[in-house]
Image (spheres, helix red, strand yellow):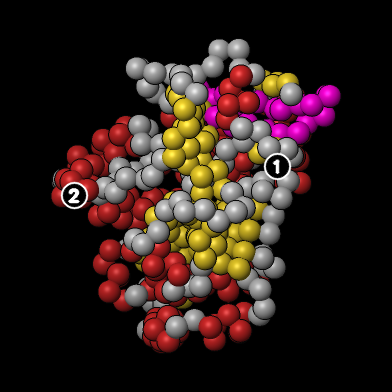
Amino acid sequence: MELIKYNHKSHSKLWDKFVTNHDLGSVYHLSAWKKIIEKTYNIKSEYFIINDNKNIIGVAPFFKLKNPVKKTWLSLPYVSYAGILSNSKISLKDFIKKIKDPPKKIISRKLIQKKTNSKVVTMKISLGGTKDEFWEKLGKSQRKYVRKCKKEGFIFKTETDNIIDEFYDIYKKNLKRLGTPHHPKKFFIHLQKELKEKVIFFSIRDQKNDIVAIQLSFAFKKTLYNFTGFVNPNFIQKRIGTLLAWGCIKYAFENKFVELDYGRSTVGTGPYQYKTQWLAEPHSLEYISLENSNLTHIEIPEGGVLSKLWSNSPSFFTNYTGPFIRKFIP
């Protein structure tokens, strides 16, 4: 096994072709994320092509975290999962042995095929059968609120114009409400620039044609990834999130996707329960760290007191400091 340092001009097409052809290759493995994260946060990356007898057998995307105490690599910050993608099983221990100047600590967030006891999962909706059959499987409350929203004049739309500003306004307000610092706007500008046609914005518009809910998704291979989506806080009681969720599922059926990835959740939490209402099922994520030859499984901590403090802080403070703090919450 040989590691070759990634060079964008020489390797980007080779890298993305390998990701596209691999069964577990996800949108988060694409080389575009290297540019997105570097340009947004000025974090240095360590991307490697893994060769065996001059044939590519894997890719390894990592970023160097800003840790003054110990040199730490992570695959991949700001997304649900990535990790080493290979044709053969390559452990973190095997990988780190091949690095000339290895980090003190290396963290991997990876989707795995087998079920485990991990409480960290990504929720996926299987889109087998027909759209109408899926609709009939939904609970009565989901169908009731979808119909109610339509009757009240709310419309689901696949956006074709640049609506970064409208998205960012709703996104920022909701992150504050939930007690989480937000990304700078340039993160989403770089997303759109680097992932191009893979980026899709879905929206709910009211009777005045104003956007009152919005979903940022990625289309890659046969999977539609729901990356982040929110409802304008003034319209939460209208339950228009149900129309947004159903609209995305309907779009996925109509455009021949085979699954919809709802993103990371912790088993038993509110977001987890909400996603199961849309027939999403858990797929295990393996979050592990390797330090001093010791492997440790990582759980995602709940927000707690800090989240409450953030949500109760004045907007002028969170708007200004949010992007600076978010850099250090990978």
| Label 2 Cα crowd, 10 Å radius (few <14 / some 14-19 / many 20+) | some
Give the amino acid type for the residue marked by disc 1 in the picture: Val
> In the rendered image, which quarter contains the C terminus?
top left
**Residue 297 rendering spot, x and y as whole percentages:** 44, 40
Nearest the viewer among 39 and 121 is 121
Residue 285 vertical placement versus 207 (above, below) = above
Residue 56 belongs to magenta span? yes
Visible residue check, residue 205: no
Nearest the viewer among 303 and 319 is 303
- Decide if residue 105 is on the left or right side of residue 16: left
> In the rendered image, which quarter contains the N terminus?
top right
Residue at position x 59%, y 49% from top? 112
Residue farthest to the top? 100
Residue 113 vertical placement versus 326 (above, below) = below
**Residue 288 rendering spot, x and y as whole percentages:** 48, 37
**Residue 20 rendering spot, x and y as whole percentages:** 72, 46
SS under mark 1? helix
The residues colored magenta run: 42-62
Nearest the viewer among 289 and 232 is 289
SS under mark 2? helix
Residue matched to label 1: 19
Q: Which mark is residue 244?
A: none
Nearest the viewer among 19 and 52 is 52
Residue at position x 46%, y 21% from top? 292
Residue at position x 27%, y 74% from top? 237
Visible residue check, residue 247: yes
Residue matched to label 2: 308
Give the amino acid type for the residue marked by disc 2 in the picture: Lys
The span from disc 1 to disc 2 (Cα, nearest Å) is 39 Å
**Residue 83 rendering spot, x and y as whole percentages:** 57, 38
Residue at position x 25%, y 55% from top? 177
- Decide if residue 15 is on the left or right side of residue 275: right
